[in-house]
Image (tube, helix red, strand yellow):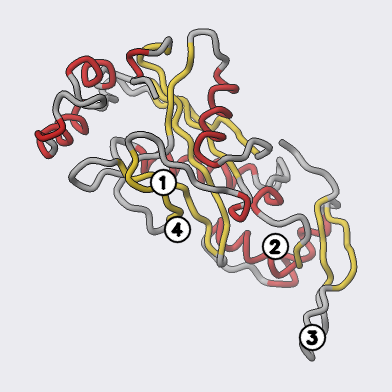
Amino acid sequence: MKSPSEQNYIQQLSIDCVIFGYHDKQLKVLVPKLDFKGDFWALPAGFIGQEEGIGPAARRILVERTGISNVYLDQFRVFGDAERSNAQVLKRIVELNQDKLGEKWLNRKEVEWVTRRFVSIGYYALVDINKVIPRKNDIDVSIEWYPVNALPTLIMDHNELVTQALETLRLNLDQKLIAFNLLPETFTMKELQELYEAIFDKPFPRNNFQKKMLDLNVLERLEKKFTGAANKAPYLYRFQQANS
C-alpha cells in the first residue's frame, strides 16, 4: 500500500467514518488501534482521489474496513476548525517511536503531508455487525468493536465526531426509517425496542413504544417466533421498505 503523499489524493481533505453496529443489546463503534508505541485509537478514515467523488470515496473506505458494501451510509457534518490538525498527535507518536523514524509512515515527507490542517467530512454507517469482518490497514495493530458509551480516548476530535454522529442517528432514526440496518431481516417488537433503548440510552414504556412503531405503518407482521418456552410466543416483524 502506497503512502498518502505518493497517491493522487486531494490535499488537506479527509473522510472520517463512524461505523455503528449493534450486538448484545449494545450500540457499538468500530475503532482501529494504531500500530505505534503508546495508546492511539482513531476512527476509520481515508482520503479522496483527485478523480473520485466524495460519496464513492466514503463507500470505498467503508468496504476496506468492513468487507461489505450494501449498507446505510450518510454524511452528517464537516469538521473544519482552523486549528484542526494532526500535528500534536504526530508529535507524540514521533516522541514515543524514535526507533521507527524513517520508516514508511514516519518519514519526513509523510509527517509533513498529514500534519497540515485538514478539513474532514464526517460519515456514519449502520451495519449488521454479524456480516462485518473488521479489516486492519498498514498502520493498525487491531480493529475492534467498542460500546459507544465506553470508547477509548481517540485522537484529535474523533470522540466528538462519534458524539455528533450519534446525535444525527437519533434525529434520523424514525424520519429516515433506518433502524432496520442494525437488525437482522426479521425481529421481535422486544428486540426492536431494545435497539431503540441502546441508541437513546434510556428505557421506553413497552405499550407506548409498540403503539408508536405500529403507528408508523412501516412494519410487516409475520409468523410467531416459537422458542419452545411456555410463555406466549411473540410475533416476528420486518420493515416494509429499506432506505439506503
Numbered tag placed on residue 31 in the rendering: 1
Task: Please report whichever mark, 4 or 3, sits nearer to the chain's N-terminal start.
Answer: 4
| Quarter in which the C terminus is drawn | top right
- The residue carrying mark 3 is 228
Look at label 3 and name its amino acid. Gly
Name which of mark 3 and mark 1 comes first in the sequence.
1
State the residue at coordinates (44%, 43%): 162
Mark positioned earlier in the residue sequence (4 or 1): 1
Amino acid at pointer 1: Val
User: Which SS class for mark 1?
Assistant: strand
Q: Which residue corresponds to mark 4?
A: 147
Query: Distance of mark 1 from mark 2, alpha carbons?
Result: 25 Å
- Residue type at mark 4? Pro
Give the Cα distance between marks 4 and 3.
32 Å
- Height in image: 130 above or below 36? below
The residue to which callout 2 is attached is: 192
Residue 134 versus residue 206: which sits nearer the camera? 134
Residue 55, above or below 70: above
How many residues crowd around disc 4 within 10 Å: few (fewer than 14), some, or many (20 or more)? some
Q: Measuring from the top left, give residue 202's x and y in whole percent.
A: 54, 65
Q: Residue at x 49, y 29 (%)?
A: 77
In the figure, residue 168 lies in which quadrant?
Answer: top right
In this view of the protein, which residue sits in the foreground, 240 or 99? 99
Q: Secondary structure at mark 2?
A: helix
Mark 4 element type: strand
Which tag is nearer the camera, tag 1 or tag 2? 1
Q: Quadrant of the N terminus?
A: top left
Q: Mark 3 Cα within 10 Å, few/some/many (few <14, many 20+)?
A: few
Q: Nearer the viewer, mark 2 or mark 3?
A: 3
Report x, y in % for residue 157.
33, 36
Q: Residue type at mark 2?
A: Leu
